[in-house]
Image (tube, helix red, strand yellow):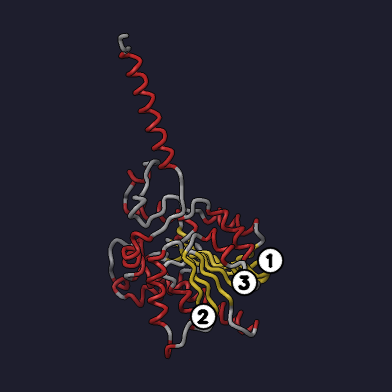
Amino acid sequence: MPTNPQYINNSDAVNSTENVTVQALKEDVRTDRSFDAIADHFEKKVYGGLKGDIRLAVLRRDLFEYCAQTSHKLGRPLRILDVGAGLAQIAIELATQGHILVINDISANMLDKAQERAAQSSANDEKLNITWYVCPYQELEEKLADKTEKFDLIMCHALLEWLAEPAAVMDFFDQQLSDNGALSLCFYNPASFDYRNLIMGNFNLLDNTEYKADSKKSLTPNHPVAKEEVEAWLQAHDYQTLIASGLRVFHDYSPLKRGGHNDPEAVIRMELRYSQLDPYKWLGRYLHLLATRVS
């Protein structure tokens, strides 16, 4: 019996279309991002220069005074959870101040680096009170089930923009945070992406609605959450914002480094000065919101 060539061609076309559709669906499916494969690149790119120094300076200013005052008020060290901690610099420094830390990240390589840093930070070989969990944050609830005391502070820094379902993490925070606890959210500011490319003249990139950064190597998120969205989450979950700061409100927008830009200490001083002032703080490459639960 002769074969019908037309039938074969149509079948091939259908299979080809199905393959393309399946591939497209795979590419559109979002998953929580792990930097396990590029931990060294992450460390160098994010914290290997002045950008990282500015980031840490603002977070230290926002958090350390709050933690000291709250600890004094409660008469004890704080119980602090750092979710998606990465290299965990701020968490480790809080541990050296005597607080009790639980540090989590999905990447074993990132927490290996953090543990090395913690070992170097221990004064007089005094062991820091840190518990480490390598897992997605969704598995933390089970691991923390035996801990009857909830956390006084939960830190979630540069994680929201890498989650497949970022809004869902708010329910986890509600379960783990004490009634009078505080939530520290630091997240990539999508408005800064547009503003920087406007300054740089990258209009073609801004006109390209299909633009996506390299999902394997880039540290620019393809799915950032806007300030208004995060503020809506906080309001819906009965949080009141205490502090709002911008991280790198001008440094990244200066293509020509002149005058004070050549003095790192001066840059950090000015970044700190303008990081909490309107309208400059909302231009930060990252935003930091410190909020407490409303009783």
Tell me the element at label 2: loop
Q: Could you say which quadrant of the image residue 208 lies in?
A: top left
Please name the amino acid that badge 3 sits on. Lys
Residue 147, numbered circle: 3
Tell me the element at label 1: loop
User: Gap between marks 3 and 2, in whole Å?
Assistant: 15 Å
Between circles 1 and 2, the one closer to the viewer is 2
Residue identified by numbered label 1: 294
Q: Is residue 137 visible?
A: yes
Q: Is residue 280 visible?
A: no
- For image coordinates 50% across by 67% down, the residue present is 245
Please name the amino acid that badge 2 sits on. Asn
User: Gap between marks 1 and 2, in whole Å?
Assistant: 29 Å
Which residue is the extreme one toward the front?
Answer: 1
Point out the tag, 3 or 1, that comes first from the N-terminus. Answer: 3
Find residue 43 and report its horizontal and vertical position in percent.
Answer: 34, 67
Q: Quadrant of the N terminus?
A: top left
Tell me if label 1 and label 2 are in contact, CB under 8 Å.
no
User: Gap between marks 3 and 1, in whole Å?
Assistant: 23 Å
Residue identified by numbered label 2: 129
Please name the amino acid that badge 1 sits on. Val
Q: Answer above or below: position of 70 versus 175.
A: below
Point out the tag, 1 or 2, that comes first from the N-terminus. Answer: 2
